[in-house]
Every structure is written in structure tokens, then in C-alpha cells.
Amino acid sequence: MIAVITSTLIPSSDVYSFFSVEERWNQTIKTIKTLFESGFESVYLLDNSCKDFDRDALYQQFQERLIISHQKQYTFQNKGINEALLLLNHMYLLPKDRNLFKISGRYFLVDDFNTSTAELQLQNADFVGKGYNYKHKTGLVSTRGYFIKNTEVYENILVKAVEEMQVYGSKIHGLKSAVKSIQNIFTDTLGSPFQISMEQAFARVIKKDHTVSLLGRLGIAGYVAGSDHLELIEE
């Protein structure tokens, strides 16, 4: 099994982060260390920082088992779209027909993380991860960390998730959205009235088109960068 990290070591100046660039760097190194310590044969670090960073410092520490790709890209307000595009643009880099674990940069594995259970479940499931009110129509799955059967499945989910994030606001989901849709007929507007999160879009896609196995706990932890105080998330 391989591991894929999506990171932004150096965010753009208009993106708030509770942590400094140095702190983000050290947190990402911890992410990489815990992945290798857990037995992943190779780790792919996919980064969309606004500036270049010192890859050699990471290569010297982790050598050929770490594959780094840095792609500067436009930062949309919807962070889920940013991550989905980063992943889609790197599907060519990932080996085919391999189980993979995706984790967001700066999060790290804890003692109860275990790939064996996920590998067994991926024999019959496309997605293994953690859900929140999953069966509800507005249910979510965590995108901080999850397991995927292979890149073909992954690409299919990501493409549909991007489309769903963009068009969800123009669909009718109840009385309010029905009224809004009627108003839009008579109003010349561009774009979607609003966009849903990656977590909700992912859940909607996999519920409709994929086999899913939900875990009670992922075995990851990390600090939320967008919070105005130190907030540890454990899943």
C-alpha cells in the first residue's frame, strides 16, 4: 500500500493559518515519519504551495522512498476543489492497481492506526474511511484520511466530487432551494449559488456509485490550521 499526502507547506498570504511556515514544515515531516514508521513502502507528497520550498532537505531525510511533486495552483475559496484538482493532476504519478491511503498534510498517525483491516475491507470496498451522519442526505465523510482501492476508482470519485461541489447549489433539495431555482430563472447570474464541502460531495458520490466500508476510528490526529486557537482533531 502507498500513502499520499496533500499539503500546502507555504500557503498564500490571503489564506489564514494558525501556524507559521516553519511549524507547518515540522508538522508535515511528522506526517511523513509516522507513515514510514507504520510500514508504507512509499509516500507521495503532493504540494500546492504558492512558493518553492527546499525539497532536498526532505529527500536527504527520507531518500528515494519519498516522492515529491510541487504544483503551484490557483487557490479557490472552496479548499475541497483545490485538493481535488491537486490530486487529479497527479493521478499519472501514482502506481495503478494499488491500494492507497490519503492523508492531509500536518496530520499524523497514532498508535491504533492499522492498514491490515483496511486492506481486507478494500477487497470488497472502493472506499474505507470515517463517516459523520453518513446515511443522512447531508452526511459527510472525513477527507483528512481515507483508504481507496486504486487510482481508477479514485479518479472517478474525485471528478464527480468536483462536479458535485460546483452544481449542488443549483439543484432542488427542498422548498428553499426550489424557490431559489425559480428566482434564478429570472436572474442572469454566473456560477453556482453556493458550493458544498469536499466532505459532503465525497459522501454523496460514494453513496451513489461505490461500495463503502466505514470505520469507527481512523487512527489519525492533527491540529486545525484554520482555527483561531490550538485545536487538536482525533479521528
Image (cartoon, grey):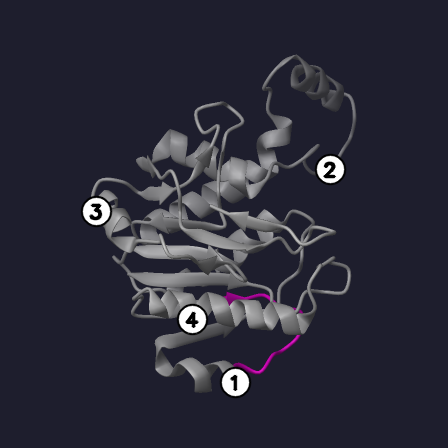
Q: Position of residue 149 (x, y in %)?
A: 29, 49
Circle nearer the N terminus (4, 2): 4
Residue identified by numbered label 2: 190
* Image position of 84 with respect to 56: above or below: above
Q: Say few, some or many: other residues with alpha carbon within 10 Å of mark 4 (under 14 / 14 to 19 / 20 or more).
A: some
The magenta segment is: 46-56
Kind of residue sitting beneath label 4: Lys
**Distance Cα–Cα, label 2 vs label 1:** 45 Å
Q: Secondary structure at mark 2?
A: loop
Q: Judge whether residue 125 can be spotted in this image.
A: yes
Tell me which amino acid carries mark 1: Ala
Q: Secondary structure at mark 4?
A: helix
The residue at which mark 3 appears reads as 120
Secondary structure, magenta segment, majority class: loop
Q: How many marks?
A: 4
The residue at 50%/23% (across/down) is 137
Q: Left or right: 230 with respect to 27? A: right
Secondary element at image label 1:
helix
For marks 3 and 4 on the same chain, the one whose residue lies earlier in the sequence: 4
Q: Earlier in the sequence, mark 4 or mark 1?
A: 4
Q: Which residue is mark 1?
A: 57
Amino acid type, callout 2: Leu
Q: Which residue is mark 4?
A: 33
First along the sequence among labels 2 and 1: 1
Mark 3, Cα crowd under 10 Å, few <14 / some 14-19 / many 20+, is few
Residue displayed at 52% across by 81% down:
55
